[in-house]
């Protein structure tokens, strides 16, 4: 029986010498079969994903050969030298979970190590201490290859995500520009975005500060995890998007978008076919522009119809406010704020004098007297639906333009919402 050389006395030399012999003797063919079988038995994701056994077998041969070459300290054959990168990128394209990919690679260790131990024993190199140290060396090599695969996988995954994002953005833009009345465009772009051709859609637009780019990435990631169809993207100063509202509950929509609250966003809901997205984006943009530029947050059209309507033409809106509430605005500050406070509470609490008295810590008669004075000053009846509509609309605009008029008074909180 062949005797090892003197250099085989050290653990590194033992493992290197055995690895070289395994490469020369063609043992990889047998190890390849064992490892491939174990992958499909112990990692069910591979079988479920429809990966071809022959392809996995070739990949296993490459990685086992590369592992032995590195252990032996010799150059790897050309077909094995780039195996970690090639396989990592391929598995990302096949959308096999990274954890399953790394598990499959670690199964190589379970095949490789027994083969090394057996050959060492066959060659009278079965010194226990040397083999224990050698085990760590083999494990380190296998782990390093697994990490190279993971890095290639993640890089390819980022490329795929970026590529899909580009395609989705192009579909979104095409819908905005050419989707109205074009069923074929709606169908094609809808498929690219994971949206139905007709339904209820959430449209948003706005901007984020330069240091809040991570908020956008988190939103995109969360939408992907929940498999919500649509698109959200663009530069931080011009973000826009559409979501399939049918995939989300109303409260869930607001919870998902809450991460954008350091930016300025408008959100609108539209119903119909995908040709309505252009109108939805216009509505969302009007909402986003309906508040001071220094303010941050997310505003929903469903919460702010009156404010948005009044903001659409500021000159006309301010004239309307002066017409309806001008007589109150002209009163001395203390009296003006007191009456505006009561009027806001009247709107907020649906005209309930008892609720106003309780919330504002006032006697009911005091509330009635103030309401009577309001009606006298403005010359309108709060019991008249038409007059009340004018008052509520003008009040909403005044709250937007002069919030200081609705600060807390000695009676309590004045601001209506």
Image: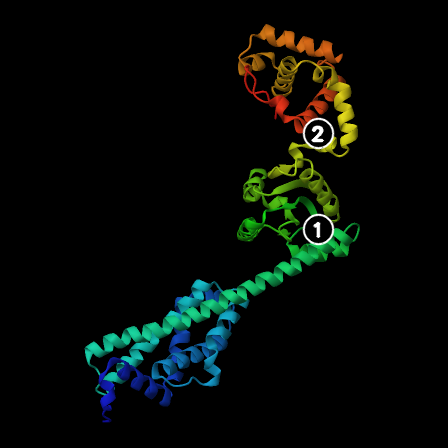
Quarter of the figure that contains the N terminus? bottom left
Front residue (pair 183, 235): 235
Front residue (pair 50, 93): 93
Left or right for 305, reference 353: right
Q: Is residue 227 above or below residue 377?
A: below
Q: Earlier in the sequence, mark 1 or mark 2?
A: 1
Image spot of residue 183 (x, y percent)? 77, 53
Structural distance between the alpha carbons of marks 1 and 2? 30 Å
| Residue that carries the numbered disc 2 in the rendered image | 306
Q: Is residue 323 above or below residue 305?
A: above
Left or right for 300, reference 55: right
Image spot of residue 231 (x, y percent)? 63, 52
Q: Quadrant of residue 167?
A: bottom right
Q: Quadrant of residue 362?
A: top right
**Could you tell me which residue is drawn at 47 percent across and 67 percent down?**
151
**Number of numbered discs on residues:** 2
Image spot of residue 47 (x, y percent)? 47, 68
Q: Quadrant of residue 401?
A: top right
Residue 94 visible somewhere in the drawing: no
Determine the secondary structure under disc 2: helix
Determine the secondary structure under disc 1: loop
**Could you tell me which residue is drawn at 25 percent across and 75 percent down?**
133
| Residue that carries the numbered disc 1 in the rendered image | 197
């Amino acid at each position: 029986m062949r005797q090892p050389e003197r250099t085989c006395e050290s653990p590194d030399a033992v493992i290197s010498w055995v690895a070289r012999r395994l490469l020369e003797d063609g043992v990889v063919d047998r190890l390849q079969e064992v490892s491939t079988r174990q992958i499909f038995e112990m990692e069910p994701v591979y079988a479920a994903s429809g990966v071809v056994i022959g392809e996995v077998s070739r990949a296993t041969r490459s990685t086992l050969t590369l592992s032995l070459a590195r252990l032996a300290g010799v150059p790897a054959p050309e077909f094995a030298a780039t195996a970690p990168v090639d396989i990592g990128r391929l598995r990302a394209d096949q959308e096999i979970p990274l954890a399953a990919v790394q598990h499959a690679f670690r199964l190589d260790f379970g095949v490789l190590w027994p083969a090394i131990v057996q050959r060492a024993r066959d060659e009278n190199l079965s010194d226990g201490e040397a083999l224990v140290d050698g085990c760590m060396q083999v494990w380190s090599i296998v782990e390093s290859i697994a990490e190279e695969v993971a890095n290639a996988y993640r890089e390819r995954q980022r490329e795929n995500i970026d590529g899909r994002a580009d395609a989705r953005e192009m579909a979104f833009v095409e819908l905005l520009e050419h989707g109205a009345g074009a069923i074929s465009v709606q169908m094609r772009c809808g498929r690219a975005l994971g949206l139905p051709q007709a339904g209820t859609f959430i449209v948003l637009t706005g901007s984020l500060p330069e240091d809040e780019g991570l908020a956008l990435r988190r939103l995109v990631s969360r939408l992907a995890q929940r498999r919500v169809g649509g698109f959200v993207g663009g530069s931080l100063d011009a973000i826009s998007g559409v979501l399939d509202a049918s995939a989300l509950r109303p409260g869930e929509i607001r919870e998902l978008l809450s991460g954008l609250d350091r930016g300025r966003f408008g959100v609108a809901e539209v119903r119909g076919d995908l040709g309505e997205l252009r109108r939805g984006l216009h509505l969302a943009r009007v909402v986003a522009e309906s508040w001071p530029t220094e303010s941050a947050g997310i505003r929903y059209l469903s919460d702010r119809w009156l404010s948005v309507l009044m903001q659409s033409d500021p000159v006309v809106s301010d004239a309307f406010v002066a017409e309806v509430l001008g007589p109150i605005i002209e009163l001395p500050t203390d009296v003006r704020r007191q009456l505006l406070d009561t009027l806001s509470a009247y709107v907020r609490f649906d005209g309930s004098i008892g609720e106003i008295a309780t919330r504002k810590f006032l006697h009911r008669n005091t509330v009635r007297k103030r309401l009577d004075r309001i009606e006298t000053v403005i010359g309108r009846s709060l019991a008249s639906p038409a007059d009340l509509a004018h008052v509520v609309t003008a009040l909403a605009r005044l709250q937007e333009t002069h919030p200081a008029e609705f600060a807390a008074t000695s009676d309590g909180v004045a601001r209506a919402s």
